[in-house]
């Protein structure tokens, strides 16, 4: 994932960041717009619904009020004693003919009078009148309710089977004489007439109107299956929608207001405005589906959404184009950096004027390129110089190697002796020295020395010592004299590295007499034929090159046949193992004790191997020099 | 589904019309009564049945028995007659122009007061479903509050039970005879009204009244355990065609069982019949009615179609106490199945 993030382009990152931000803004804007517009549109539409409901109520209530007024006129006619029955009938007849809203009318005497009620109606402007047969009318609402309540009553819709056989609603009024009910007057309005007034689709472009009776029955509705079959309460039960019950309760209670119905009923997802009709306590409702109500809002939101998408695309393209133009010089810069990294310090750094940051970056790259170029140049010179010095050192090492005698079985063709030397500098060159040469025909001189320090200065000092000894040896046959001369030379020439330990011996070949002087050097070991050894630790002075008037002594040893002289420098005794422990003289003596039969070459190589084994793994390095000489060994031919 | 139901309903209606016109030729359909009808025959044994009221779920067992061909399976050809007043229906049975009539138990016993005119071949209702309902807003919160109030009671013989109950309780009320409408009660013209739990009570709820606004006296719960509807034939018919009477009752019970186990289908059939009869119909009311009828017809699986002797005796005792009842009618005489 992290890798993916790193790999995403600048254009991608800019577009995704900006567009995400814009998306959030657009979504918030759309929601805010919808919320505000919805409220405004809802207020407007609800106001329209209220207006529509008022119109319906005005029309219906006008008719009901008119019928009530006509009934009152008829009542005054009916109870007027000055009028004959014929005159009363004529007046009622003209009332019926003059008012088409009145579908039929009925006069009924008290049941106890035994006079059957009369129904009057018109068919095609022809006046008809008939008597109601049987006693069933006594149990009909139009008769029974005013009879029991003593008040005028607007009936629920009913079928007047003894009149025109249509469904009507009736205004039934008790007639009183001296406080007693003497009969009833009933004015009928055809229900269809009220239904048409209520649901006329010409008046409703968006929603529809419905009429609810005082029992909550849907008396008029555009869905004819509901009319006279369902009440708001039965719909509430059928669709398990308590809101419809609330609507029904409010409507039959004569209240007015708005309600939003959801659920699954025929009123689903609709807003309903309701208000009562004063005359008969019925109620008119106007319902509009919310989707219709919100059509304009949805259109605005659709336009807003399309605009947002367009802006989105345009901004995305603009960012992409700009990001490409910004990243192009960066890519060129990256390519140039790659070339510099590959060693092409003359690669051209592209300069861009697209933005200040990129110009600054290009200039910084140029400065870096210049510095890098100079640095590499200096490095090259330094390396060349170093290589030259190293070459010199290697050459010096070769010279140093040539200064020491080459190992042959009988050095200087001396039959009485065998000698084997090893010079192993820690670096390319060292400060150790061994040498041997004939002073005259009977005197063999050998020396081992260790110059203070390492490297080229110590090597130079060693070279001087070697050369000096060779040049002065013919004049001195004594070890102490030779070393005394050497010390004087070293002290006088004030060489920086003039501190030299040395052990020099002279063997008289004919007698086997060895005179030696040890000037601050390590002890000398002589190994016998029986593989025992003797340590000669006596020193005859301090190291050379410090004090000019140095007194140097010497000792004499009589060599026996097969004696092996073992000489070495501190590289052997100060060899350090991995635990940083020195080998020491004790370690060396253990090696000598374990050596096989005397033979200078074997002895030297065996000691070197053991020392190297001891020091394996250690980082400490010192020059190691060994010189082994044996005298008149019986194996010598 | 709907076209199928419409075809069925249309078929039933056509059948009714055809049979109405063929009632006069009744005697030619009937054999000597000694031979069993061929069960597989399409021209089964004709039984003329008169409904108690307009189509509604109160009679769902009969409708489903017809609709599912259960009568035919028992070799019967049930012909539904026109609606008529209970007294007229009893006369028609006596005259032989009608075979089976549904009646309330009290009405049937009263019809037998002089001599046995009807026998019970099966008791549909097992409970008294009559309620006396009042608005609490009229300060009626107990039976005692009924005293002196106006009560709307039906003008049919169904009002007998209400009157008997009130007399037994020692409550004196003003009776206002009403027809089927509850509007007089809704308008406050009466303080109390008699109502069937499965019908008028629910109509009140569908007119905006709430349960908590009403005080309800459930006659059955108050001890007036006299079941409502049973099926009756004249004794001679029963003696001549006992197997057919039994088959008719069995098919009717099967019809009820089918209705209770298939309520949605049953209400669909009932609604279609109501639409065809052009009467006010709403589904919620019919579902309520079917549920209430289940409690009434089949209070338990063992109690269906049977007239219990104790119920009969209770009804007879009530009538004897209420009115000048001339004779004691034996249970086995009234309900021949009870003798077995």
Image (spheres, coloured by chain):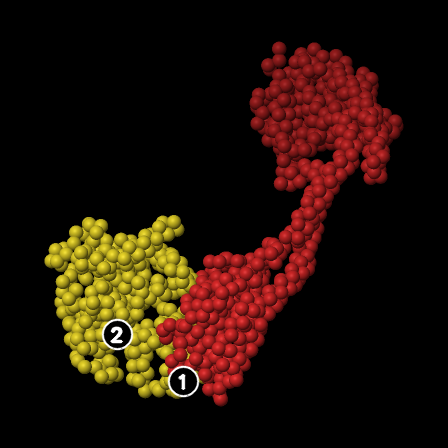
Chain colours: A red, B yellow
Sequence-wise first label, 1 or 2: 2
| Image position, residue A334 (x, y; %) | 76, 31
Give the vertical position of B202 relative to B20 (above or below).
below
Q: Residue sitting at 83 percent across and 38 percent down?
A: A355
Dot 1 and dot 2 residues touching (CB under 8 Å): no
Q: Quadrant of residue A354?
A: top right
Give the vertical position of A529 relative to B244 (above or below).
above
Instruction: Determine the CA span between mark 1 and mark 2.
Output: 26 Å
Q: Residue sitting at 40 percent across and 76 percent down?
A: A116
Q: Nearer the viewer, residue B291 or A350?
A: B291
Give the vertical position of A162 relative to B132 (above or below).
above
| Image position, residue A216 (x, y; %) | 49, 68
Q: Nearer the viewer, residue A396 or B67?
A: B67
Query: What SS does tag 2 mark?
Result: helix
Visible in this render: residue A248?
Answer: no
Tell me the number on the disc at residue B149.
1
Query: What SS does tag 1 mark?
Result: loop
Q: Is residue A373 left or right of residue A85?
A: right
Tell me the number on the disc at residue B107.
2
């Amino acid at each position: 994932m992290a890798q993916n993030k790193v790999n995403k382009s600048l254009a991608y990152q800019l577009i995704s960041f900006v567009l995400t931000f814009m998306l959030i803004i657009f979504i918030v804007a759309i929601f805010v717009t919808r919320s505000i517009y919805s409220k405004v549109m809802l207020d407007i539409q609800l106001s329209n619904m209220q207006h529509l409901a008022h119109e319906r109520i005005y029309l219906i209530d006008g008719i009901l009020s008119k019928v009530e007024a006509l009934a009152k006129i008829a009542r005054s006619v009916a109870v007027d004693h000055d009028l004959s029955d014929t005159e009363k009938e004529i007046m009622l007849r003209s009332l019926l003919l003059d008012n088409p809203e009145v579908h039929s009318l009925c006069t009924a005497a008290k049941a106890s009078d035994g006079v059957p009620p009369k129904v009057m109606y018109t068919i095609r402007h022809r006046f008809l009148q008939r008597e109601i047969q049987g006693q069933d009318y006594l149990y009909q609402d139009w008769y029974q309710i005013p009879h029991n309540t003593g008040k005028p009553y607007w009936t629920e819709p009913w079928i007047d089977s003894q009149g025109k056989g249509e469904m009507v609603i009736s205004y039934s009024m008790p007639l009183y004489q001296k406080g007693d009910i003497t009969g009833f007057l009933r004015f009928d309005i055809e229900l269809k007439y009220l239904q048409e007034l209520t649901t006329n689709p010409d008046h409703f472009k968006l929603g529809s109107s419905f009429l609810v009776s005082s029992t909550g029955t849907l008396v008029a509705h555009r869905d004819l299956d509901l009319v006279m079959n369902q009440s708001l309460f039965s719909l509430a039960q059928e669709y398990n929608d308590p809101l419809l019950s609330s609507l029904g309760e409010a409507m039959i209670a004569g209240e007015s207001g708005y309600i939003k119905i959801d659920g699954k009923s025929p009123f689903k997802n609709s807003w309903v405005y309701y208000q009562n009709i004063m005359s008969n306590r019925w109620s008119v409702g106007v319902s509009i589906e919310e989707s219709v109500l919100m059509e304009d809002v949805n259109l605005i939101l659709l336009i807003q959404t399309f605009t947002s998408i367009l802006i989105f695309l345009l901004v995305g393209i603009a960012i992409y184009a700009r990001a490409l133009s910004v990243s192009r010089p960066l890519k060129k810069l990256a390519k140039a950096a790659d070339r510099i990294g590959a060693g092409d310090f003359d690669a051209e750094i592209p300069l861009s004027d697209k933005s200040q940051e990129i110009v600054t970056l290009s200039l910084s790259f140029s400065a870096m390129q210049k510095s890098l170029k100079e640095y590499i140049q200096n490095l090259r010179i330094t390396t060349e110089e170093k290589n030259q010095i190293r070459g010199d050192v290697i050459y010096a090492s070769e010279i140093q190697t040539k200064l020491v005698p080459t190992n042959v079985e009988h050095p200087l063709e001396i039959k009485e002796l065998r000698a084997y030397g090893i010079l192993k500098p820690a670096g390319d060159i060292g400060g150790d020295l061994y040498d041997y040469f004939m002073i005259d025909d009977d005197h063999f001189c050998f020396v081992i020395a260790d110059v203070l320090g390492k490297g080229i200065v110590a090597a130079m000092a060693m070279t001087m010592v070697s050369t000096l000894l060779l040049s002065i040896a013919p004049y001195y046959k004594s070890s102490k004299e030779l070393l005394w001369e050497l010390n004087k030379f070293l002290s006088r020439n004030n060489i920086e590295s003039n501190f030299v330990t040395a052990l020099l011996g002279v063997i008289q070949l004919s007698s086997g007499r060895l005179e030696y002087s040890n000037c601050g050097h390590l002890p000398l070991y002589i190994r016998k034929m029986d593989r025992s050894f003797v340590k000669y630790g006596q020193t005859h002075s301090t190291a050379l090159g410090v004090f000019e008037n140095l007194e140097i002594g010497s000792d004499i040893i009589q060599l026996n046949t097969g004696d092996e002289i073992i000489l070495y420098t501190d590289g052997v005794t100060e060899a350090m193992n991995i635990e940083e422990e020195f080998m020491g003289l004790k370690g060396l003596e253990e090696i000598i004790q374990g050596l096989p039969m005397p033979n200078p070459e074997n002895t030297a190589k065996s000691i070197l191997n053991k020392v190297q084994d001891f020091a394996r793994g250690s980082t400490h390095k010192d020059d190691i020099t060994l010189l082994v000489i044996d005298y008149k060994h019986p194996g010598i031919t | 589904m709907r076209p199928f139901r419409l075809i069925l309903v249309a078929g039933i209606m056509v059948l009714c019309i055809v049979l109405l016109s063929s009632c006069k030729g009744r005697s030619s359909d009937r054999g000597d009564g000694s031979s069993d009808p061929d069960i597989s025959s399409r021209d089964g044994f004709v039984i003329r049945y008169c409904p108690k009221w307009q189509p509604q779920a109160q009679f769902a067992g009969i409708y489903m028995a017809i609709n599912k061909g259960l009568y035919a399976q028992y070799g019967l050809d049930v012909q539904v007659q026109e609606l008529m007043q209970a007294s007229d229906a009893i006369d028609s049975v006596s005259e032989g122009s009608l075979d089976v009539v549904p009646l309330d138990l009290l009405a049937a016993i009263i019809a037998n007061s002089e001599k046995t005119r009807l026998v019970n071949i099966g008791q549909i209702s097992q409970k008294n479903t009559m309620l006396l309902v009042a608005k609490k807003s009229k300060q009626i919160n107990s039976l005692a509050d009924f005293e002196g109030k106006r009560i709307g009671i039906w003008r049919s013989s169904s009002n007998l039970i209400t009157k008997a109950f009130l007399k037994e309780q020692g409550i004196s009320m003003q009776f206002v005879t009403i027809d089927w409408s509850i509007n007089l009660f809704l308008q406050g013209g009466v303080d109390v009204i008699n109502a069937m739990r499965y019908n008028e009570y629910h109509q009140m709820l569908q007119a905006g009244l709430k349960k908590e606004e009403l005080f309800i006296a459930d006659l059955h719960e108050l001890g007036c355990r006299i079941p409502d509807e049973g099926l009756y034939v004249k004794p001679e018919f029963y003696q001549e065609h006992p197997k057919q009477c039994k088959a008719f009752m069995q098919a009717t019970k099967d019809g009820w069982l089918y209705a209770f186990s298939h309520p949605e289908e049953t209400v669909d059939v009932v609604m279609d019949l109501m639409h065809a009869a052009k009467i006010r119909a709403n589904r919620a009311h019919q579902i309520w009615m079917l549920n209430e009828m289940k409690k009434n017809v089949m209070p338990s699986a063992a109690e269906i179609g049977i007239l219990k002797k104790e119920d009969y005796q209770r009804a007879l005792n009530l009538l004897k106490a209420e009115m000048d009842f001339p004779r004691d009618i034996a249970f086995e005489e009234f309900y021949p199945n009870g003798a077995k």
